[in-house]
Image (cartoon, rainbow, N blue to C red):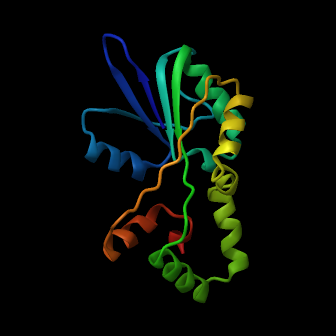
Amino acid sequence: AALEALGPTGLAVGIDMSMGMLTAGRRARPGVALAAGVAVDLPFRDGTFDAATANFVMSHFQSYKTALADIKRVMRPGARLAVSAWADSRDDLQSAWTEMVQNVVPREMLEPVGKQASPWHDLFRDRRKLEEALRDAGFRHLSSEQHEYRFTYSVEEFVEGLESWATGRF
């Protein structure tokens, strides 16, 4: 997630609970302030930020309602929130990886790990459900769009990316 206090200082702060993601963020954007944290107890005063983003993170919160309440807490009145969520489909590399993992780890062991890592993944694949969650949290004037992206990456990049996936731990 990223939070911004626009205005004269133009402060932008990147938040993630994963030290690996913070390290990657530091490499990609060395001038951006980063903080370890979760959107259940953000380390900022009420009304600090003019804008917030929650990119590909909503499905990972154990309680998305609590996370949205805390994000709203640190936003000023009239601030804007941008949220993105995966509505993913399987590709050949994901299918091959899943098949390989399931040859070693039984499906009944894998499914709970996936649900624990991303309990709301299936819910937020539906943009109407994401909009409903935002409305229920008190956000208004919602607008959403659906986009399709095609990513191209090498097998090496795919395997490196597995470090952040729940099944990659196996």
Residue 44 is at least partly visible in this image: no
Query: Which residue occupies the foreground of this view, 103 or 79?
Result: 79
Query: Which residue occupies the foreground of this view, 169 or 133?
Result: 133
Which part of the image, by quadrant, shows the C terminus? bottom right
Quarter of the view holding residue 135: top right
Q: Residue at x 42, y 57 (%)?
A: 149
Q: Residue at x 70, y 23 (%)?
A: 138
Q: Residue at x 37, y 26 (%)?
A: 12
Q: Is residue 49 left or right of residue 158?
A: right
Q: Residue furthest bottom?
A: 103
Q: Is residue 116 above or below residue 41?
A: below
Residue 79 location, x and y as percent? 52, 18
Residue 67 location, x and y as percent? 64, 35
Residue 54 location, x and y as percent? 52, 38
Query: Which residue occupies the foreground of this view, 8 or 139?
Result: 139
Residue 69 is at least partly visible in this image: yes
